[in-house]
Image (cartoon, rainbow, N blue to C red):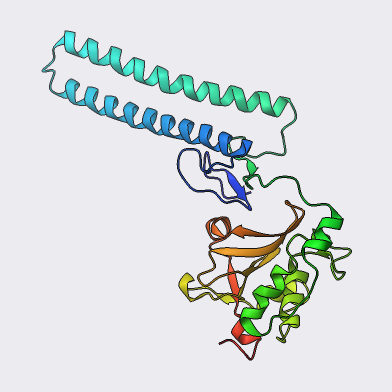
């Protein structure tokens, strides 16, 4: 879960487009929840600004009231309404927290934070038979560009750690290792724990090239194009190897995301 930032959802493997409801024509329930949260966040910000505005305004009126009991009385009444409204919000907040704790949600430090998978609907995952037929493992790509071609041969394969080295099955690190080795390149490692210490800071994202692998602790992905706008990765959530928009990875893991540059492992990177 991310840092304690109120009303901040955690995205996972998504293709969010931004906006009030951050999705295109393929929306999930999570996108709707995020839209509702965005509205709530906007209204809460508006409430805070309005409260501060009226408190300041009434304070100014009291200062220029010149001792007028009528104006002072009106200011006190207005301030009372402002603080009562704000206090009502805080009471509701405490009540909701108390109810959730009573119901057993003790594992949640902040109930307004939630983990949400916004992977856009792409239909049911292929069966294992379809997975093996879609990507046949005919690894003919060579060099840096060949890494992508080899990874594409594994698209549709079933996500599996126990069977990661068999055709038709893969996890994220096996996908990268097999794509690199089949391209005649040196393997960057067997698991992400081996790969991450070798990775370097990305710097300018435009420096990323097709075949580079971007990695954060626990997951590694192959850049499908220059600039790494799309990635090929074995997603445990989707249950298969697929191509995704990379925006979620850069947004969520920007500070820890690193790169394994294919040019450091392949001789032919023309």
Q: Is residue 204 visible?
A: no
Residue found 51% across the figure and 35% down from its top: 35
Residue 200: where, in percent of width, then height? Answer: 58, 77
Residue found 59% across the figure and 85% down from its top: 263
Residue found 29% across the figure and 15% down from its top: 78
Quadrant housing residue 150? bottom right
Residue 24: where, in percent of width, then height? Answer: 52, 44
Residue found 55% across the figure and 70% down from its top: 225
Q: Is residue 77 visible?
A: yes
Q: Is residue 153 above or below residue 35?
A: below
Residue 163: where, in percent of width, then height? Answer: 88, 65
Left or right: 39 in relation to 195:
left
In this view, the residue farthest toward the bottom is: 267
In this view, the residue farthest toward the top is: 70
61 or 23, nearer to the observer: 23
215 or 157, nearer to the observer: 157
Q: Is residue 107 above or below residue 47?
A: below
Q: How many numbered marks are there?
A: 0
Q: Is residue 184 above or below residue 151?
A: below
Residue 206: where, in percent of width, then height? Answer: 46, 72
Quadrant housing residue 130? bottom right
Quadrant holding the C terminus: bottom right
In this view, the residue farthest toward the left is: 66
89 or 192, nearer to the observer: 192
Left or right: 51 in relation to 253:
left
């Amino acid at each position: 879960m991310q840092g304690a930032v109120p009303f901040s959802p955690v995205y996972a493997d998504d293709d969010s487009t931004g906006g009030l409801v951050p999705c295109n024509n393929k929306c999930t329930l999570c996108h709707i929840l995020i839209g509702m949260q965005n509205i709530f966040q906007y209204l809460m910000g508006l409430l805070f600004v309005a409260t501060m505005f009226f408190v300041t305004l009434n304070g100014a009126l009291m200062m220029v009231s010149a001792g007028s009991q009528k104006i002072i009385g009106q200011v006190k009444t207005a301030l009372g309404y402002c603080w009562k409204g704000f206090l009502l919000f805080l009471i509701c907040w405490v009540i909701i927290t108390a109810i959730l704790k009573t119901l057993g949600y003790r594992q949640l430090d902040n109930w307004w934070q939630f983990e949400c998978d916004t992977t856009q609907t792409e239909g049911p995952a292929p069966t294992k038979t379809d997975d093996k037929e879609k990507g046949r493992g005919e690894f003919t790509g060579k060099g840096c560009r060949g890494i992508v071609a080899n990874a594409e041969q594994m698209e549709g394969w079933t996500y599996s750690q126990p069977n990661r080295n068999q055709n038709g099955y893969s996890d994220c690190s096996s996908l990268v290792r097999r794509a690199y080795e089949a391209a005649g390149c040196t393997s960057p490692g067997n698991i992400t724990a081996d790969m991450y210490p070798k990775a370097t800071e990305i710097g300018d994202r435009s420096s990323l090239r097709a075949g580079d692998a971007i990695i954060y602790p626990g997951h590694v992905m192959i850049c499908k194009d220059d600039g790494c706008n799309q990635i090929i990765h074995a997603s445990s959530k989707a249950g298969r190897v697929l191509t995704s928009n990379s925006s979620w990875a850069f947004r969520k893991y920007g500070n820890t995301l690193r790169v394994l540059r294919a040019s450091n492992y392949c001789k032919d990177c023309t």
